[in-house]
Image (cartoon, rainbow, N blue to C red):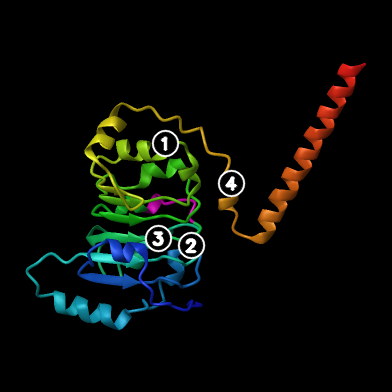
Amino acid sequence: MRRKPNTNIKSDPERFYSAPNIQIDFSNIDCAHPSQLQTEEANNEATVRKQIDAAKNSVHKIVFGVKLNDCELVDLSGLAPLISKYCQPDQVTILDLRCNQLRSVSELSAFTSLKYLYLHGNELEIDCLQFIPLMLENLTVHGNPLSLIVDYRTHFINHFKELKHLDFCPITKNERKWAENAVVDLTVKRQNVVLQKMKTKGQIDEYREKMKQEQQKQKEELEKRMKKDQM
């Protein structure tokens, strides 16, 4: 399994949350599914094992954080079995899944103690909400197709009653109060940021060519109507 270079630069999530007791790091490893990592060691395997051994006699509750960011994941199949090599899914309070290609997060329903969930930079639509634990306190979803929905923030605030921060921005009392009575049309999306979803130069060029052809077609139709009106 190819491991990408680690820049050792702290990300936004790492600066944003307090560190868990034990952090399991599988970030920057090329794979499509967590199940492919079952035979792999974490980037910090030795440290994690030492921390787990040291925590066995602790009288305090041990919580875990899991990093699976920047892995090219397309789904989360095999996530719970992978985590079970180190702890139970309900011991995980922080899960970092940012900057992948996720279209589904149905496996998240097993992680009942999650407080911090980072999903920004994926391919998620609004229907993923049904699988995200409701007790979340911090969530990021920007950079997903669902974030193109007008007023998606209002919808998320109303859906997650315990949420304190969304996309790294705090949720105020007034904002939550307003969201309770707001109605969001989930079918209305912004059209002027479609290029932000494109990930390759080929996709961008194809989209621009399509728009150019459409503009030319509209121009020709307009000229025909103008000539017809002049007759």
Residue under label 3: 97
Q: CA distance from mark 4 to mark 3?
A: 22 Å
Residue 190 lies, in percent from the top left, at 53, 39
**Residue found 30% across the figure and 65% down from its top:** 15
Q: Is residue 180 left or right of residue 76?
A: left
What kind of residue is marked 4? Val
Residue 96 location (% of width, % of height): 36, 61
Q: Mark 3 to mark 2: distance in Å?
A: 9 Å
Left or right of residue 121, residue 206 in this image: right
Which quadrant holds residue 200? bottom right
Per the image, the residue denoted by label 2 is 73
Circle 3 residues within 10 Å: few <14, some 14–19, many ≥20: many
Q: Is residue 185 above or below residue 42?
A: above
Q: Is residue 8 magenta?
A: no
Q: Nearer the viewer, residue 114 or 8?
A: 8
Disc 4 to disc 1, C-alpha distance = 17 Å
Q: Residue at x 44, y 41 (%)?
A: 127
Nearer-the-camera pick, 71 or 181: 181
Please state which of the two labelled residues, at mark 4 or mark 3, is closer to the viewer. 4
Say few, some or many: other residues with alpha carbon within 10 Å of mark 2 (under 14 / 14 to 19 / 20 or more): many
Q: Nearer the viewer, mark 1 or mark 2?
A: 1
Considering the whole magenta stretch, tell me its main secondary structure: loop
Going by the numbered disc 2, the residue's amino acid type is: Leu
Q: Which mark is residue 194?
A: 4
Q: Which residue is mark 1?
A: 151
**SS class, disc 4:** helix
Q: CA distance from mark 2 to mark 4?
A: 22 Å
What distance separates the C-alpha of mark 1 from that of mark 2? 28 Å
Q: Are marks 3 and 2 in contact (CB under 8 Å)?
A: yes
- Mark 1, other Cα within 10 Å: few <14 / some 14–19 / many ≥20: some
**Quarter that holds the C terminus:** top right
